[in-house]
Amino acid sequence: MSTTGLAVHRDDIPSLDGLRAISIALVLAGHAIKVGPHSFAFSALCLHADLGVRTFFIISGFLITTLLLSERSQSGSISLRSFYIRRALRILPAFFLFVGCVALLSIFGVTPVPSWFWLYVLTYTVDFAPLGVWVLGHLWSLSVEEQFYLLWPLVTKNAKPRTCAVVAVVAIFASQLAYAVSRLTGANLPDNAFPFVCGPIAMGCLLAIGARKIRTVIISSKLLSDSRILLLTLLLIALLDAIPTYFGMITNSLLTLCVARLVFIPSGVAGRVLNSAPFVLIGKLSYSLYLWQELFLNPFHSRAPISTPFPVNLVVILAVASASYWGLEVRFVGLRKKFRKTQQPVASALPAVVIPEAKGAF
């Protein structure tokens, strides 16, 4: 697939929307299942909401870093103003629509939200909130993303890729160290706070920085490009994620490897599925699905804030998310084009999208 003369945009990178579809499916499944003791086999198959979130983080780190490095290669600099405007146009309209609806429901007593919690919501610091509120608690991961959007472009703009890679590696190990210190000292800090969960995002950033070399290694290696190894790796990830102990860094590393494999070799059965129209559609709706899900799903109680039986609740979530996306979000998504630089890219600006076909890929 030739990319000569094309700028790098989200839609140019294969498999990302399909991976988003898988990720949001894991999150929805995890939130739809009632809390309680489950067998190891059941946990290995069904309870992977956190794994879906970590996949989102890896994808985000990879995509944002790819776009930033592409822009710097094209124009010699990175416009932070344009970057933040593009992010705001993508994130804020749907966010304010959802938050506004929850606020109205809270006023009428349908989904009571403590007044103090709104400060965390509106400042994108839910990941630091001492207590969660189910209908808005999932915004912790969006808060982590927003903090990443605030910090990482500053690093990428002012540092060389090699320095950025060092920063990402430090973030990976620092997050593990911070989590261990918190546990050993009994500091009782929020588990989902940015310093503890930024590791997968940093791995995605590293993947983008080293994309050309990693792509070459994966494609040239019979082991890494083998569909059976991909399948075994995915099974291993599911097993490690189901074990009630700490394999976070190992799981995140394997997950990053799978993302790289599916992006750099998008052929074969897996590639066709991830890049098929249904998966791409769900991937595009993933942000809306993420926002609206917890109004209709609540595994902690017998009734969700807005009660609908399973699987009708999933249909309702899809309908509401589709209305949000097609009725509101696409209008602002189109505006982002005005804040993209149009300079002719050079070859080095395309680290992730020059992907030859690989035979026998799963």
Image (cartoon, rainbow, N blue to C red):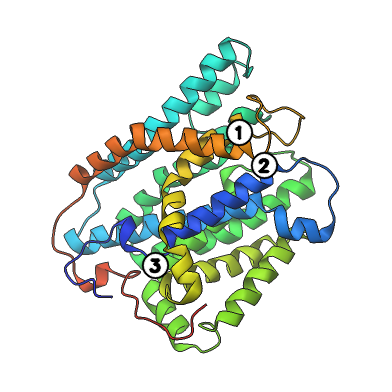
Residue 342 visible in the picture: yes
Q: Earlier in the sequence, mark 1 or mark 3?
A: 3
Which of the numbered marks, if any, corresponds to residue 175? none
| Contact flag, marks 1 and 2 (Cβ < 8 Å) | yes
Q: Which residue is mark 1?
A: 294
Where is residue 99 drawn, in percent x and y?
49, 25
Q: Which residue corresponds to the image point at 48% horizontal and 28% vertical from the top-left?
A: 123
The foreground one among 129 and 91 is: 91
Where is residue 51 drawn, in percent x and y?
63, 55
Which quarter of the figure is the N terminus placed in? bottom left
Q: Which kind of residue does numbered mark 3 sit on?
A: Ile
Q: Earlier in the sequence, mark 1 or mark 2?
A: 2
Q: Which residue is mark 3?
A: 209
Q: Earlier in the sequence, mark 2 or mark 3?
A: 2
Q: Which residue is mark 2?
A: 31
Q: Secondary structure at mark 1?
A: helix
Q: Which residue corresponds to the image point at 46% horizontal and 39% vertical from the top-left?
A: 288
Q: In the rendered view, does 220 fall on the left or right side of 317? A: left
Q: Which kind of residue does numbered mark 2 sit on?
A: His
The foreground one among 298 and 174 is: 298
Q: In the rendered view, does 84 fall on the left or right side of 21? A: left
Q: Which kind of residue does numbered mark 1 sit on?
A: Glu
> Gap between marks 2 and 3, in whole Å?
34 Å
Query: How many discs appear?
Result: 3
User: Compared to 125, does 346 lie above or below?
Assistant: below
Where is residue 235 drawn, in percent x and y?
68, 70
- Tell me the crowding category of disc 3: few under 14, some 14 to 19, or many 20 or more residues within 10 angstroms, Cα based: many
> Gap between marks 1 and 2, in whole Å?
8 Å
Q: Secondary structure at mark 2?
A: helix
Q: Secondary structure at mark 3?
A: helix
Q: Which residue corresponds to the image point at 52% horizontal and 27% vertical from the top-left?
A: 121
Q: In the rendered view, does 300 fall on the left or right side of 151? A: right
